Image (cartoon, rainbow, N blue to C red):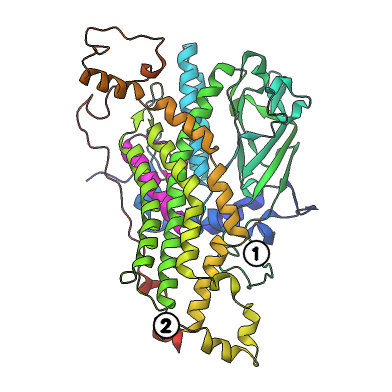
Amino acid sequence: MNAPAPQATLMSGDDFRESLRRYKPRVFLDGQLVDSVVDERGFGPGINAIALTYDYALKAKYAPIMTAVQHTSGKLVNRLTHINASSGDLLNKLEAVRLVCQETGCAQRYLTHDALNAIGQVSSRIDDARGTTENTARFLNYLHRVQDQDLTLGIAMTDAKGDRSRRPHEQANVDSYVHVVERNSKGIVISGTKAIVTGAPYMHEFLVMPCRNMGREDADFAVCCAVPVDAPGITIIARPAGRPGEKVEHGAALFSRKYGQSTGVVMFDKVFVPWDSVFYEGEWEHTGHLTYSYATHHRHTCIGARAGFGDLLIGAGALMCEANGFDPGKETHLREQMVELITITEGFYACGVAASVYGKPDEYSKTFMPDPVFSNIGKLMLATKIYDMHRIAHYVSGGLIVTLPGPDEDHNPETGAKLSEVLRANPDVPYEQRIETARFIEDLTAGYQGGWYSVISLHGGGSPAAMKQEIYRNYPVGSKVELVERILERGVAGEGVPHDPDRAITRNRQPGKCCDTGCTTPGQPVMVDLPSVEATLPSRRQSAD
């Protein structure tokens, strides 16, 4: 029997909260300087979401999917800090992200995974170009520290950008992009602004990455490094996570008072970074590969995240149908809507599964990349279908989700009893449960949180235009052209006819999915069953009583 792998330090959610006290970042929220991030109510829902990724890794029933053995150290680590070594790893990462987002809506920590995988790949590429092993060794040293300490990293990638028609070196305000302002024997000094950093206030460290392909003149902007969130010279200007404690028309938000996501503008003012935390600087030739690699990993991961959100809408929509007195299995119009919601959710998730199964090892690092075409198709589907998901939830729920009186009326002696009588539909579902489900759907789709989910689904990980570009750039249109030309007996390139490098539509050809090497087992995904409703909630009879 094989001995269990040695284990890195795996924190609990409470350990994560306590670990944040070791950092003293300069953070502003709603115009006020935050004294303690972990004690700030406005950040609580975001901290809760990340804390869940720690707690799930320690639960016996979730540990097989929430942890993995890091092949470069042999240690058991949190899945969201792990480097993928197989198609099975990609499948399990997808499942893990869906699992935590079924609870939180957006668990945020998966960005750590995506960036680490991308930086590892570009480090190997730079070493190959230089004929060295220095960059990979530096990255692995950092990776193992992150895993051993079980850290969560903020991805400081999207620059403020300034005038979008100009390249970084052409900007009137050079600080619209993060750039190197000084190099010395100890390290580099960086300045500039990252405009969108997920979870910025409650991260342990930032991974600073370029957001675009740089040219030779942009070499100072081609920088990738790691810095603690409280490094001198860093200022974070953040927005609240969710709606904790907010008194709104329909009462405290049932979902977003517990889970949410803060984002922050992060300003770097002559921040020193030691050389052992610099993954590259000045190598403008490799910026395109880093952004491409990160985008592919992240779009693949987003598929799992938004599938978890879809699961919430499917469950809540079904509950609302039942509370309204309908069985979707018997009501054609409701069944059609529910099936459309299921088809959307499982359709883009299936793209994530395909991207995992068809994933291939990176040429230089040999770590696994999800298939770019399926990753981008899945992300494009969820980005554009999120509005349909909301529409369907509204259709099956009815207008009650936004026309309800506020919850204070439930306790008004002059109106409460009457409301509970007239707003009850299905006699088997208590009034309180019907109203609670309606307010839950409102929070997810028709209020602040719903609008927020729409925007991050549309633009998170890049705009739909960027995904379409990647789909066409990677899709083997040339193979399809050659297929038709063979049927038309025109003579096919590769069969006695030379390929024409100047012919645009045949430039990209597919060497074969699994057929070029034969079918192989990509690794068994670990499917974790969620607890049953009966195991986690009081019975309907108890609720009614």
Q: In this view, does 490 lie to the left or right of 531?
A: left
- The alpha-carbon separation of the residues under discs 2 and 1 comes to 32 Å
The magenta stretch spans residue 522 = no
Q: How crowded is mark 2: few (under 14 residues within 10 Å), some or many (20 or more)?
A: some
Instruction: Name the N-terminal-most of marks 2 and 1.
Output: 1
Give x and y (percent) for residue 234: 73, 38
Query: Considering only vertical position in the picture, is 271 above or below 103?
Result: above
Residue under the point 40% across and 57% down: 341
Q: Nearer the viewer, residue 542 or 1?
A: 542
- Residue segment shown in magenta: 77-102
Q: Position of residue 93 (x, y in %)?
A: 39, 44
Task: Check disc 1 and give the amino acid type.
Answer: Pro
Residue 370 visible, this angle: no
Mark 2 = which residue?
426
Q: Is residue 209 above or below residue 308?
A: above
Residue 244's tag is 1
Residue 98 seen from this side? yes
Pick out the residue farthest to the front.
488
Magenta span: helix, strand or loop, mainly? helix
Q: Residue at x 35, y 73 (%)?
A: 327
